[in-house]
Image (spheres, rainbow, N blue to C red):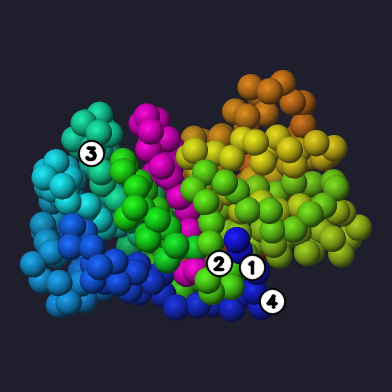
């Protein structure tokens, strides 16, 4: 069960949340190992190397090899967690995840950091607008987008209990808190954050905070708005989606990802498969590459702030 916070304040860095969760897990489970692709400083996974040096491996800038090593560890009974920036955790190593991971029925838990505009000054080469789309195409892969530190902590701990390929994306830095500490969730189940009659907003990840702000702004103009945090993008909670679409005039998706192949596409597929003629507005990045700038500049530049989303709705 989850509870919402009253104020959406920026919490601790998600990279710290991930490291703290892994260190706690490794204290009680000697099968959990952590691998990083020469980003231990950026990810703070070097802290894991200090607390559990025998179960931390820096593979260097060799991401495909990292996935291969993780697959080998899985074959020998270990539970590997791997990290690198989002594009290198998915786009660069897609065939290894497909064959050495999913096809071979291994367990690999992947943290792809700084998705979308969170890439900041690292620029277009380090920007991933397509990580969800790529992994959605692989059978039986679980994909999560963490809304805040409480949810990220729960996801990491839950991944450690499960078999298979699991991917979570999230900003390395702090994001606005949505959930109260101690909240729990369920993989494959969306979270209904507020109820409304007119518009259904389905959001995921860091932009859940913006979705709630958009809902508040529209409510002030007389619209009744409902918001779902669809933190598990695959498997998508079709049951909740179909239930909450009943009687709605329109639906909108909000994601820090391309509108091609991500959350918006997943929702569109549900609408189409069930013959629902409900207008859908997909808010995300449309056929663009990343660029250099602060995360705040990039979020605005790509139309993903509360103000820019409201502007798109008024077109």
Cα–Cα gap, marks 3 and 2: 29 Å
Q: Mark 3 or 1 closer to N-term?
A: 1
**Residue receiving disc 4:** 6
Is there a contact, CB below 8 Å, between mark 1 and mark 2? yes
User: Any mark on residue 85, and which?
Assistant: none
Q: Where's residue 183, x and y in %? A: 55, 66
Is there a contact, CB below 8 Å, between mark 3 and mark 2? no
Mark 4 or 1, which is nearer the eye?
Answer: 1
Say left or right for 98 vs 253: left
Q: Give the secondary structure at mark 2.
A: loop
Q: Give the secondary structure at mark 3.
A: loop
Cα–Cα gap, marks 1 and 2: 6 Å
Q: Nearer the viewer, residue 251 or 193?
A: 193
Q: Give the secondary structure at mark 1.
A: loop
**Residue receiving disc 2:** 183
Q: Where's residue 190, x and y in %? A: 60, 48
Label 1 Cα neighbours within 10 Å, binned few <14 / some 14-19 / many ≥20:
few
**Residue receiving disc 1:** 3
Cα–Cα gap, marks 4 and 1: 10 Å
Q: Mark 3 or 2 closer to N-term?
A: 3
Is there a contact, CB below 8 Å, between mark 2 and mark 4? no
Q: Mark 2 or 4 closer to N-term?
A: 4
Label 3 Cα neighbours within 10 Å, binned few <14 / some 14-19 / many ≥20:
many
Label 2 Cα neighbours within 10 Å, binned few <14 / some 14-19 / many ≥20:
some
User: Any mark on residue 106, and which?
Assistant: 3
**Extent of the magenta region:** 129-150
């Amino acid at each position: 069960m989850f509870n919402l916070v009253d104020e959406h304040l920026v919490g601790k860095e998600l990279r710290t949340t991930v490291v703290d969760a892994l260190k706690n897990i490794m204290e009680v489970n000697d099968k959990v190992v952590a691998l990083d692709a020469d980003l231990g400083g950026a990810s703070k996974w070097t802290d894991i190397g200090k607390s559990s040096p025998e179960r931390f491996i820096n593979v260097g800038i060799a991401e495909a090899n990292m996935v291969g090593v993780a697959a080998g560890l899985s074959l020998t009974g270990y539970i590997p967690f791997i990290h690198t920036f989002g594009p290198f955790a998915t786009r660069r190593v897609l065939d290894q995840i497909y064959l050495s991971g999913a096809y071979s029925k291994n367990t690999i838990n992947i943290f792809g950091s700084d998705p979308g505009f969170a890439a900041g000054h690292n620029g277009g080469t380090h920007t991933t607008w397509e990580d969800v789309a790529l992994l959605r195409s692989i059978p039986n892969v679980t994909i999560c987008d963490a809304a805040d530190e409480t949810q990220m902590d729960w996801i990491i701990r839950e991944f450690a209990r499960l078999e298979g390929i699991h991917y979570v994306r999230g900003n390395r830095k702090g994001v606005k808190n949505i959930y109260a500490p101690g909240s729990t969730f369920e993989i494959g189940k969306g979270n209904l954050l507020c109820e409304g009659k007119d518009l259904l907003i389905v959001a995921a990840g860091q932009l859940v905070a913006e979705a709630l702000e958009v809902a508040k702004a529209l409510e002030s103009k007389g619209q009744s708005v409902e918001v779902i945090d669809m933190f598990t993008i695959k498997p998508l909670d079709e049951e909740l989606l179909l239930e909450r679409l009943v009687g709605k005039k329109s639906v909108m998706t909000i994601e820090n990802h391309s509108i091609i192949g991500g959350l918006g596409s997943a929702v569109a597929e549900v609408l189409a498969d069930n013959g629902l003629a409900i207008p859908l507005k997909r808010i995300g990045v449309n056929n663009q590459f990343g660029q250099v700038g602060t995360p705040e500049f990039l979020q605005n530049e790509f139309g993903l702030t509360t103000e820019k989303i409201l502007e798109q709705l008024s077109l």
